[in-house]
Amino acid sequence: GFYGDWDQISPARAFQIMGDYETGRKLLRYMLTLPCVDPHFWVTMHMIIAVDDMVACSGDREFLREAYPVLQRIFTVAAAVADPRNGLLTLPFTTGADDPSEVGVEGLIWPSCINAWWYGACRSMENFAVLMGDAGVRDTAREIGDRMAACYMDVFFDEERGYLHAAVDPATGLGTGAYQNVSTLGMDYPYGKYLLRSRLREIAEYQAYALCHPAGRTMVAYDDESHEMLRNTIMFHDLGHETKAARAAGLGDEAVRIPGTHMRLFDRCKVAIETHN
């Protein structure tokens, strides 16, 4: 099946990194034309920050003008349902498990991963709105972003573990017993580092040691409450934000080791594998 995040938006970033902005924009343009995408926040948040990254790297303001009406629409949908207390989005899953029950999720939750992207999307939309002269979106994005920045670590960071809960119950404020690598998803884009800055060293060290595996990497800690299968799974599309977390925290050896895991398997299989079990 087609999964917009990894199958379309992430390849757009790959072309962007290689300097092929035309192909990158073509892939993002396709996402901007998809119908009925507005409530799928794990996709729309990624679209906003990916367009921001493309515009920043290519300098193509015309692409921003082209994309802005769609980005404005999907942002407005998300902003309308953000929690009025803290700005967080409520969803039925995290990005790291096709079956939410595998990471202890039942019902609606605040996922740490998607909300980190949502924070980045708010900051991107604030900047876009300044450029486009859209005071309404500018003020809304700034207000929600500020609310999230003030509470994100208090909501998600587990002091005992030194890492982020995969999800938190909005009704009770209690975190799940799952600690997933996708929790540092915000590090994929520039604003994630600011969001996690106060405990970034601890978060990166947890990933380096608790999520280590003989094959190189694992999605969840060996002693958490996730499904057993996830303890022996590597999802390679997460290596980027894991590597950036390690690098930002000064863990140079770990930042080299993480992509090395992927390259060893690539050399062995001669194909880029998304998920290795």
Image (cartoon, grey):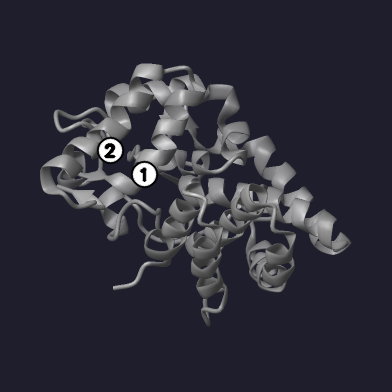
Residue 220 visible in the displayed image: yes
User: Within the image, what quadrant is residue 197 found in?
Assistant: top right
Q: Residue at x 52, y 69 (%)?
A: 26
Residue 234 percent across, percent down from the top left: 23, 43
> What amino acid does circle 2 point to?
Val
- The quarter of the picture where the N terminus appears is bottom left
Q: Residue at x 26, y 31 (%)?
A: 260
Residue 108 percent across, percent down from the top left: 45, 60
Residue 84 percent across, percent down from the top left: 70, 55
Q: Residue at x 48, y 45 (%)?
A: 112
Q: For the residue carrying disc 1, how many other residues have a C-alpha within 10 Å: few (<14), some (14-19), or many (20+)? A: many
Kindly state the secondary structure of the residue where label 2 is placed: loop
Decide if residue 3 is on the left or right side of residue 185: left
In the depicted structure, whether residue 47 falls above or below residue 170: below
Q: CA distance from mark 1 to mark 2?
A: 12 Å
Name the N-terminal-most of marks 1 and 2: 2
Mark nearer the viewer, 1 or 2: 1
Residue under label 2, please give it. Answer: 220
Residue 154 visible in the displayed image: no
Q: For the residue carrying disc 2, how many other residues have a C-alpha within 10 Å: few (<14), some (14-19), or many (20+)? A: many
Decide if residue 15 is on the left or right side of residue 51: left
In the depicted structure, whether residue 51 falls above or below residue 113: below
Residue under label 1, please give it. Answer: 238
Kindly state the secondary structure of the residue where label 1 is placed: helix
Q: Residue at x 60, y 54 (%)?
A: 54
* Residue with the most extreme bottom position: 35
Which of 27 and 191 lies nearest the eye of the viewer?
27
> What amino acid does circle 1 point to?
Asp
Decide if residue 104 is on the left or right side of residue 163: left
Residue 186 percent across, percent down from the top left: 52, 42
In the depicted structure, whether residue 35 falls above or below residue 88: below
